[in-house]
Image (cartoon, rainbow, N blue to C red):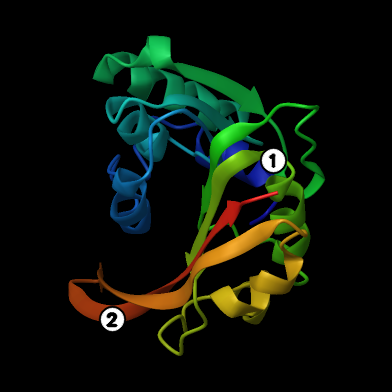
Amino acid sequence: MFEPEAWEDRYAGDETMWSGNANPQLVAEVPALTPGTALDVGCGEGGDVVWLARQGWRVTGADFAANGLARAARHAEQAGVAEQCDWWQVDARTFDPQGRTFDLVTTHFLHPPDAGMGDVVRRLATAVAPGGHLLVVGHAPSPLFTQLSESRRRAMWHAAELVPSLPEGFEVVVAEERPRTTVRDGVSHEIEDATLLARRVG
């Protein structure tokens, strides 16, 4: 599930996979920030990219699936924010900002196998401009995810587990699990979003 080929196939059809709405923790944290440049890694169909653009950000949506980026670009066009958006095909596991920096770097529900999220955090942090923020949100481990394989459950993480991966010069603003209600098969469940927000001060 964490290889480009699998996601290219998932995005190859006509059916929309996601709601198109912004992720809740992005909506919770970003209004307190001054709009600038943003990078959304693992942007999928572009819901967060479009929301950020509507808040006044200049946004680069990044994903390792070209089909996902094409969907995101169409979403931005339909939303009337295409001129505020750029697109970048890149794998978070090998991410290199190539000297580019952003006022906000964010990723939601990225769960590389083999406890690889710490390395992803280190890589993404190199793209944060001085004074900028890194927002990383994922699924906290939960017994509710019984439908997932053991390897996918092991790829989940708590926010505090990622703090040691932050480079020197970052201060933690938020590192916690936040409850959220989700519906599966018509039944409401309480799950937790592992939420890490850090600011680059040096």
Residue 43, percent from left and from top: 50, 39
Residue 138, percent from left and from top: 50, 65
Total of numbered circles in the picture? 2
Q: Secondary structure at mark 1?
A: helix
Residue receiving disc 2: 190
At 35% from the left and 54% from the top, the residue drawn is 29
Residue 196 located left or right of residue 50: right
At 69% from the left and 47% from the top, the residue drawn is 124
Dot 2: within a 10 Å radius of its alpha carbon, few (fewer than 14), some, or many (20 or more) residues? few
Is residue 81 or residue 156 the one in the foreground? 81
Dot 1: within a 10 Å radius of its alpha carbon, few (fewer than 14), some, or many (20 or more) residues? few
Q: Earlier in the sequence, mark 1 or mark 2?
A: 1
At 46% from the left and 77% from the top, the residue drawn is 176
Q: Is residue 113 visible?
A: no
Residue receiving disc 1: 5
Name the residue type under label 1: Glu
Extreme-bottom residue of the structure:
143
Is residue 134 or residue 148 the one in the foreground? 134
Q: Marks 1 and 2, Cα distance to the nearest angstrom?
A: 32 Å
